[in-house]
Image (cartoon, helix red, strand yellow):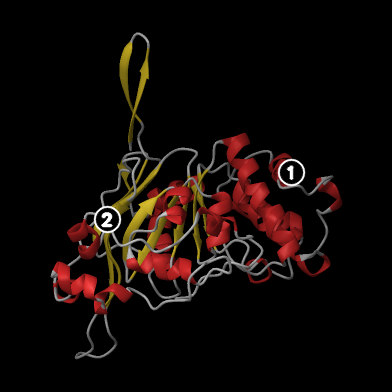
Amino acid sequence: MSASSSSDGGEDSITVTPVLSASGVLVRFSGRGRRSAAATAVDGVNLDIAPGEIVALVGESGCGKTTLARTMLGLERPTQGQVSFAGQPLSYRSGGLRDYRRKVQLVLQDPTGSLNPRHTVYEAVAEGVRVHRLDDERARVADALSRCGLRPPERFFLRYPHELSGGQRQRVVIAGALVLEPEVLIADEPVASLDASVRGEILSLLLRLRADLGLAALVVTHDLGLAWNIADRLAVMYLGRIVEVGTPEQIFADPQHPYTRALMSVLPESPTEPIARCPELASGAAAAAGVGQRCTSVPLPVLPATPSGQVQVSCHLAQALGKAPAGGQAQALGKASAGGQAQAQA
């Protein structure tokens, strides 16, 4: 990711190395039988995450979001392409992965399932410290719990998961990731299993950790309200590819890809009726532009990893028309509450 800054004395070009990036990542799973076709879960994705940046990866269930997140975490090895951390390709040797996973930590969706019911809060948070053989175990655990809003931390040391509320359990999970002092958090639906009253607190916690520690984050979600409230940049994923990238304001105000407009149409604030995905493929606009056959037979262009400051869209129709037809969306769509009101299913 590169950025330029100007001053009265001239222009200086400042190049910022992404803290985490995917370059041409393709993940394909083979079928069980000899005649079974391989399934492509992630199809040539490029994505950069800058230091301190929060990127929201949105899309419907089954579009490849979690597979991409697992690949960037090192849990899946890409069929093609590579994942890089601080400009260096990820090493899949045990020693390389051990060091990498201290710097890139995962926050799972279900805090109840993430925590061992037989382990106390102290043991759950201290597990990573012991695996990586770090010193000052008690001080690290206490500091992580305090940063996550569990104060005084000693009060929670001997508690078990069933003695905590849902929000407190999620804070313990975040503390378990934070105790290793990572540079990136990969959060897979971090508030999906929480009550609406608790979601805002967890989102505020993630934003505060970014401000205090400079953490970058990849937040996987299908909740567009969450993406609006937390993300610096939003990447829309469809059928294993990222099809549109931009700031939440840009995408909510003027979604350009037909699939993005379909996602926006199911929000409670949408002025339009819910629409099917990519409805333009059967419309006169697609026929007039001559892209109806291309959408099913010609691979979509792959978006570059580096953001340009403008919305990037991978769509034959949008490129043929110079800009996709207006979807009638308004900026107010993005202000949907992160409390579950804006879960978009297309």
Q: Nearer the viewer, residue 63 or 268?
A: 268
The correct choice, above or below, for 217 with respect to 114 in the image is above
Q: Position of residue 144 (x, y in %)?
A: 69, 44
Q: Looking at numbered disc 2 in the image, what kind of residue is underneath it?
A: Lys
Query: Image quadrant of residue 140?
Result: top right
The CA distance from mark 2 to mark 1 is: 56 Å
Tell me what residue is drawn at x 69 percent, y 67 percent.
Answer: 194
In the image: residue 276, left or right of residue 186: left
Q: Nearer the viewer, residue 134 or 2?
A: 2
| Residue named by callout 1 | 138
Q: Looking at numbered disc 1 in the image, what kind of residue is underneath it?
A: Arg
Question: Considering the numbered disc 2 on the image, is that residue within a helix, a strand or a loop?
Answer: loop
Tell me what residue is drawn at x 39 percent, y 61 percent.
Answer: 236
Q: Position of residue 325 (x, y in %)?
A: 31, 62
Q: Residue lying furthest top in this view? A: 9
| Residue named by callout 2 | 323
Query: Image quadrant of residue 295?
Result: bottom left
